[in-house]
Amino acid sequence: MSPCTTRWSACFANHESTPLTFGARTVPVALLLLTLFLHESAYAQTASEFLDPPPLTTSHFLEDYSYLRDPNNRTGAWWERVKFVPLTPSGWAYLSLAHEVRLRFEHYTNNNFGSGPKPTESYLRFRDMPYAEIRLGDHVSAFGELIVAYGDRSVVTKSAFTDQTGVDVLQGHLRARLGDFTIGAGRVVLIYGSGRLINAGPNIRNSYQGVRPAWHRGRWDVESFYGRPVLPGLESFDNEPDRTRKMWSVYVTHNPPKDASGAGFDVYYIGFRNNTARFNQGLGRENRQTFGVRHFGKNGGWDYDTEGIVQVGTFNAGQIRAWAAGTILRHTYTHVARKPFIEGRLTFVSGDHDPDDPDLGTFNPINAPGGYFGENGVIGPFNLINLRMIAGLEFAPGWTLSGSGVLYWRASVGDGLYGLGGNLLRPDMGSRARFVGPQADVSIAWAVNRNLNFNLAYSVLAPGRFVKDTGPAETVHFVGSQVQFKF
């Protein structure tokens, strides 16, 4: 079995495909996209005010535009003409279209503390995701979404999980609703709760293929899933269900009241099997059961989110006993000009205590999001204690400036340091040091409107004692910028 099927890591780095080279076309392509974005933005700003449109989500199929069936609910906004295209005179059947285009630049100096296959590198990523949905009344829908993603990156580092997947089917499923129950089948992007475990992914969206029963009533949502993660490839139309992994889950949410202060909670179970899992302890078969509870909400200017997770199961002949806990507390000074905010985040993710013991204590976040602990994507949520403090403000309409300080420690000295995708960056190598290093981030974002946004970020990550004990220990510098348009 190829090691490229082991985890969510960038294991396609050695794939011998012909890299996409933007070359001299980079600037014209970027200018063309920017012109299109600004044209659409200007047009959007001249339209009437939106009548509480659904938020633009990552999953897309959760957006409901059936309210546009009534002409009195239409505002004249340009996007209404493509969000609701009647297929019958009454609008009982309608077509909904959407698009997301993103151009992103990234630069790393001394990636992975200087131990990466190409530590210093600059590259462009282009992502295009068009979708279409047909709804028959309120009971049946067919949804399809493509992903077109290319990376102008070295073949040594290019990955189908983060950089390039050509043209592929990201989502394609049917849904049927009967009363409070919904059943879906096909390929789907899943996001659960806070996204700490099941998320859409950093750049190349992660999808799953299987069945998805759900139940909704009032403030209660119950979702379940049974199927396999989709394994991406670097070429077009080569994504397919991963035969080495399987997932099944039940996720229960009691939502907080809408448009008011209040609390909600999640209770969930996720089963996960990986026949080719790799940890500091070695390679083997992982069968993991995850149980979690989350409490979240807001009260006045305060927002909070606390989650606790326990994992049990087996890894080869040993037992899995792992856990994680995370909390976020944010205060926004809503009555102060520029609405400044402060935020604190504390995360504890267990690690293994003895690589020679068959039992495994390393927590598995299953499908972690990108930028888990900040702007760069170097360190992932395995065997880690993380403290992050953030402050920011809106210094002009639509403009936000924020900065953060981050500290990393190993949770267990018997385990190594992992990357965002679960790849082992550094084995423990007998080091007893816990401190991985400090990080500082600064970012500026401009949300022009509902459809168009820009972002620029800088991050610096310095090596701590553990990194110095185990190999190259250079300071990591990261610069990232992007422009994104979606409707």
Image (cartoon, rainbow, N blue to C red):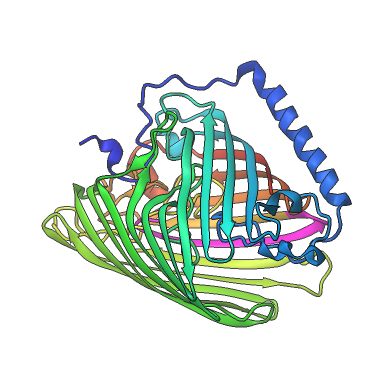
Q: Quadrant of residue 123?
A: top right
Across and down, in percent, residue 356 comes to: 14, 53
Q: Nearer the viewer, residue 404 or 195?
A: 195
Q: Residue 390 magenta-drawn? A: yes
Residue closest to the far left: 317
Q: Quadrant of residue 403?
A: bottom right
Q: Quadrant of residue 314?
A: bottom left
In the displayed structure, does residue 247 sit left or right of residue 359?
right
Please count the marks in the image. 0
Residue closest to the far front: 89
Position of 239 relative to 364 (above/below): above
Q: Residue 130 magenta-drawn? A: no
Q: Pick the quarter of the image with the N terminus.
A: top left
Residue closest to the far right: 46
In the displayed structure, does residue 355 sit left or right of residue 32?
left
Across and down, in percent, residue 65 comes to: 67, 61
Across and down, in percent, residue 441 comes to: 61, 50
Is residue 190 something that shows in the picture? Answer: no
Q: Residue at x 62, y 67 (%)?
A: 343
The magenta segment is 381-400
Position of 86 relative to 41 (above/below): below
Q: Residue at x 49, y 42 (%)?
A: 204
Q: Residue at x 64, y 44 (%)?
A: 99
Magenta: main secondary structure:
strand
Position of 91 relative to 168 (above/below): below
In the displayed structure, does residue 81 sit left or right of residue 376?
right
Position of 157 relative to 337 (above/below): above
Across and down, in percent, residue 203 comes to: 52, 43
In the displayed structure, does residue 309 sit left or right of residue 146?
left
Is residue 314 something that shows in the picture? Answer: yes
